[in-house]
Amino acid sequence: MLNLVVLVSGSGSNLQALMDACNQGMNARIVLVISDKGDAYGLERARQAGIATEVIPAADYDSRESFDQALQQRIDAAQAELVLLAGFMRILSAGFVNHYAGRLLNIHPSLLPKFRGLHTHQRALEAGEMEHGASVHFVTLELDGGPLIAQAKVAVQKDDDADTLAARVLQREHQLYPTVVRWFSEGRLCLRDEQVILDSKTLSEPVQLAE
Ligand code: GRF
């Protein structure tokens, strides 16, 4: 069983999709859910499932590094083998990112490298994109810039606004993240020399998840 730690700041719907996948036979278990926000609904989802939770309020720490050290201590104490950012709204320091090199994943609501950062749905609409989606990548020092593993696309509809588009992307995220974590749990996925290896082959572009 692969030990997962999931970091959330908000609703935790991706956390829910991961919990569901673990309950449906994935060879992994979520040992701890951590949030920087005490009122994150993701914490409630974890509690309801009997999963341990921790809140680490950023206000308790005087620097990014000291917050990240506290975070790292909790994660390592839980013996995490894979750390999943699932709507965790903080930039992580270099020491933290390097410590988890090859075992830290993020899900981002755009077809990276397009639209790093925030407000991705609105920006995709303003750019007149015909398709949009989500990406899962290994986390490196470049924000939303780590090696891409897989993407799920959605077609942009004429009458979409940022909310309708976000909702459709989120549905695809709930398929995408567990799929990638499953590959990792099966030993099929790793990062080597900043390259993504899946099934012993170097990926030259991200896997596109079928509808
Ligand atoms: C998702 O859109 C994810 O891609 C982004 O933050 C959002 C988190 O949603 N990083 P939820 O908390 O999993 O519902």
Image: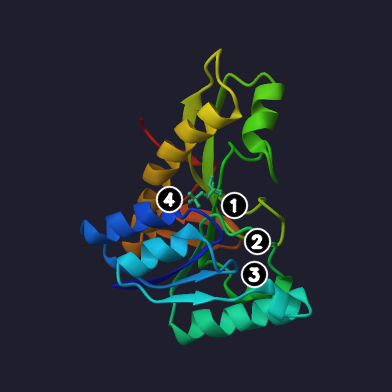
Looking at the rendered structure, the kind of residue marked 3 is Val
Residue 147: mark in rendering: 1
Q: Does the residue labelled 2 lie within 8 Å of ligand 1?
A: no
In which image quadrant can residue 109 be found?
top right
How far apart in space, not on screen, are marks 2 and 4 (Cα)? Answer: 24 Å
Marks 2, 4: nearer the viewer: 4
- The residue at 70%/54% (across/down) is 143
Q: Residue furthest right?
A: 62
For label 4, count other residues whose C-alpha is less than 10 Å away and answer few (under 14), some (14-19) or many (20+).
Answer: some
Disc 1 + disc 2, Cβ < 8 Å: yes
Determine if the C-beta at disc 4 is less than 8 A from ligand 1: yes
Q: Among all residues in the image, which is located at the extreme top?
A: 158
Image position, residue 131 (x, y; %): 55, 24
Is residue 76 in view?
Answer: yes
User: Would you say the residues marked 4 and 1 are in contact, meaning their CB atoms lie under 8 Å apart?
Assistant: no
- Spatial separation of the CA atoms under disc 1 and disc 2: 8 Å
Q: Cα distance, mark 2 to mark 3?
A: 6 Å
Q: Residue 13 carries which label?
A: 4
Q: Mark 2 points at which residue?
A: 140
Q: Earlier in the sequence, mark 2 or mark 3?
A: 3
| In this rendering, position of residue 64 left or right of residue 160 | right
- What amino acid is at disc 1? Pro
Q: Which mark is residue 97?
A: 3
In the depicted view, which residue is nearer to us: 36 or 201? 36
Horizontal side of residue 174 vs 58, given as left or right: left
Q: Earlier in the sequence, mark 3 or mark 4?
A: 4
Looking at the rendered image, the quarter that the N terminus falls into is: bottom left
